[in-house]
Image: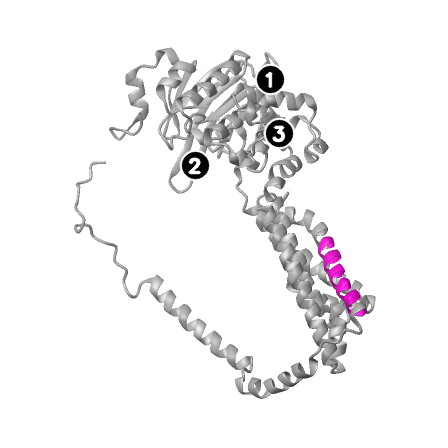
Amino acid sequence: MTTAVRRAGEYTEPVVAWWSGRRLRFALIVLLLAAFYSASWQLAKVDPGRLLTGLPKMVGWAAKAWPPATDELPVLLLRTAETIAMAAIGTTAAALLALPLCVVAARNVTPSMALYYPARWFLNALRGVDSFVFALLFVAAVGLGPFAGVLGIALHTWGSTAKLWAEAIENIPPGPLEAAAATGASRVKVIAYALFPDVAPSMVSVGLFWWEFNVRASTVLGVVGAGGIGQELKNSMDLLLFPRLLTIILLILVTVTVIDHTSEWLRRKLE
Amino acid sequence: MAATETRVAPELDGHGFVAYTEGLTKRYPPTVTALAEVSFAVRPGEFVAVLGPSGAGKTTLFRCLTGLTRPDYGTVNVAGRDIWQSPRELRLARRELALIFQQFNLIRRLSALENVLVGRLAHVPAWRVISRSFTRADRQLALGCLDTVGLLDRAGTRADELSGGQQQRVAIARALAQHAKVILADEPVASLDPESSATVLESLRSAVSAGVAVVASLHQVHLARAYADRIVALRDGRIVEDTPASRLDAKTIEQIYERNGERTDP
């Protein structure tokens, strides 16, 4: 190009006017956020005064809770194991169900857009209902106990896992898939050989995350009668058995910490 | 291709072409015309170098020939098959045509050997692909292709741990393993040092001796002269030159790379 050479200081810089779209949009966003938070503050009935009057009550309970009760430890340990088992079965079932669906729900590998949209809607519906709510329905349908919890976890996690997996698939570079498809290989072969090795680590990582999440979530599933340690938690709270309550809370803390660390360690191993 | 034409061999059309395009046009609205009415044909055992400045349409031509990009108009015929006739025709045509990409496009987490075996995917049953258990014959063939590009000692190395030049050579081994009738190579030596460039072009040249048609886009004119039989030049999506390599002179080269009265490339 034969552009005349100019020195620094001689270039005209782009001018952004105060009424420019970008600045007006920023002001509008600030206003909307302010309105949103003031409305939320009202709706959530935030009242720091009530927290202050309630605190001494909780301190009183804490004082009464010490030392934690150990006489029922075997039963409580069994309940904890029940909780971990619920999460494991529920998450695994969800993962198996998610495997075919995540391929259909990934824009870049879906067999047909006519299947892609329904798959997305279905997954969003599953994801939209919390495992707690599903468990509530299943308690009514299949009765009290951990199985209702397993079903609740499985359905919600199915939607969430498949959606995250589909996103992982959509994020992989298209080049290696094109290269495999360009050899004349069928879609199944391309997915199995070129796509899967690339996404497998992030898929396992997502699966472990949901297992860990579900262990935490299933500690409270018992509150709606879906088995596990949560059920004991609710009973102790109802009967104001504070030493027992403390034991349960400590058990939950230990379990969740151990699971979190194991899962994190496994996921780091995958990097 | 008209149905009345007689065929010399099942994989060739009536004129002895193993792959050809007719009136190939591809536009990227609003302004870019990547290919305009390109008719291009290649015979078995022919090494064609495609020259042209960046943006001339070389990559689009290769992607159209492989069916990765669908042209707006025109036909693509590979090994006697009209590739857009049906998905099945496309798949069968693709077996006969190997593409070497500018960005290699290896599967990052698989070894060099497993990447070369991608070239065998279309030839083995699905269960072997899913379980990743290829036959000994296929594995030996893949190792042989790695040997050809001088990477036998890296067979077990993960693709993302290889250098750019090594990755490109794995990609070439993958193309060789396909046993295709046509090899298309999009800038196969652009990121290689002179020594690896020679290795790569020699291995493409030896494929040509075995009757394979090779179409390679190159940036270095001297390499095109040294290895190719025929030079095709693209500019602004049109073929502006199609000549035997021996007849390529300095004036023609200047015309190929000239744009708005100004040189844009070597």
Q: Which residue corresponds to the image point at 69% horizontal and 83% vertical from the top-left?
A: A64
What secondary structure is the magenta-colored segment mainly?
Answer: helix
Q: Residue under label 1, please give it.
A: B11
Residue B73 percent across, percent down from the top left: 49, 32
Q: Which residues are magenta?
A: A75-93
The relative height of residue A19 versus residue A200 in the rendered view (above or below) is below
Residue A159 rendering spot, x and y as whole percentages: 66, 57
For label 3, count other residues whose C-alpha is less than 10 Å away and answer few (under 14), some (14-19) or many (20+): many
Q: Residue at x 65, y 54 (%)?
A: A208
Viewer-proximal residue, A189 or A48? Answer: A48
Which image quadrant: the N terminus of chain B?
Answer: top right
Q: Which residue is mark 2?
A: B27
Say left or right for A240 vs A32: right
Mark 3 or 2, closer to the camera: 3
In this rendering, does residue A82 appear at all? Answer: yes
Identify the residue position indicated by label 3 in the image.
B91
Q: Residues within 10 Å of mark 1 (few under 14, many from 20)?
A: some
Pair 2/1: label in front: 1
The residue nearer to you, when weighing A206 against B240, is A206
Q: Quadrant of residue A50?
A: bottom right
In terms of depth relative to the viewer, which is nearer, B192 or B79? Answer: B192
Asked if residue A86 is among those painted magenta in the image, a careful observer would answer yes
The numbered mark 1 sits on a residue in which chain? B
As shown in the figure, which amino acid type bears the numbered disc 2?
Arg
Pointer 3 and pointer 2: residues touching (CB < 8 Å)?
Answer: no
Secondary structure found at label 3: helix
Separation (CA) of disc 2 from disc 1: 30 Å
- Disc 3 + disc 1, Cβ < 8 Å: no
